Amino acid sequence: DQQVKQNSPSLSVQEGRISILNCDYTNSMFDYFLWYKKYPAEGPTFLISISSIKDKNEDGRFTVFLNKSAKHLSLHIVPSQPGDSAVYFCAASAQGGGADGLTFGKGTHLIIQP
Amino acid sequence: DAGVIQSPRHEVTEMGQEVTLRCKPISGHNSLFWYRQTMMRGLELLIYFNNNVPIDDSGMPEDRFSAKMPNASFSTLKIQPSEPRDSAVYFCASSLLAGSYNEQFFGPGTRLTVL
């Protein structure tokens, strides 16, 4: 049973517009959430994270929003650029991420169209 | 600054053979993780170590899989005997243990094909 779900396998967005990637989770013990970006033939690269005590974290063009009551988080990329085309994974941890394994969603393939 | 190093990058072997995957974590990191990525199951945690000690191996699929971390700078994942369904990309990741809310840094992965 998947504890972290990314229901959109793919998303196509025009360059310069906003990309919104969604993620839902079921385990209420999760207290740390991360987004990773992955290019083909490479390992996942950390993008941004948020702990459960916050509802928003921003880093440049990337913002992650957390809605604990809905068990939902989203990643906003503004403005979208061609280099953002990749697979994005949502991940969650029950012990802060560093000392505990991550549970991943299956990913969303983001395609930025020129 | 070297990231997580994995070897080999690609491995093709025949069913029944022993396979050993290797990982060197980022210097100074105390936690090491092995993940597997398949089309069906996505990225799943196999086992992780804190300060070289295995903490949770509940994700290891069968007794054919074993992992060791003899020192802070080296870990192996062994499959013996290998089967075609073990074909996947295996990732190693490391992170700081001290404190909480530390991201994990992934290596480039080993693509394993078992014929």
Image (cartoon, helix red, strand yellow):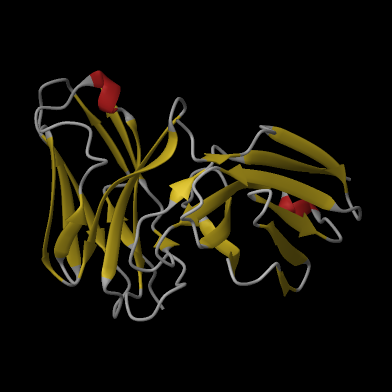
Q: In this rendering, is residue B6 above or below B46?
A: below
Residue shown at 79%/49% (left/top)?
Answer: A20
Q: Nearer the viewer, residue B91 or A71?
A: A71
Q: Nearer the viewer, residue B99 or B35?
A: B99
Q: Nearer the viewer, residue B57 or B115?
A: B57
Q: Which quarter of the image is occupied by the N terminus of chain A?
A: top left
Residue B115 visible (yes or no): no
Residue A84 place in picture, x, y as percent: 72, 53
- In the picture, measured across the screen, residue A94 lies left or right of residue A21, that is left
- In the picture, measured across the screen, residue A5 lies left or right of residue A97, that is right
- In the picture, measured across the screen, residue A105 lies left or right of residue B50, that is right
Residue B18 place in picture, x, y as percent: 10, 33
- In the picture, measured across the screen, residue B31 lies left or right of residue A107, that is left
Residue A76 found in image quarter: bottom right
Q: Which quarter of the image is occupied by the C terminus of chain A?
A: top right
Residue shown at 58%/50% (left/top)?
Answer: A90
Residue B107 place in picture, x, y as percent: 38, 57
Residue A80 place in picture, x, y as percent: 83, 55
Q: In this rendering, is residue A68 above or below B52?
A: above
Residue shown at 65%/45% (left/top)?
Answer: A23
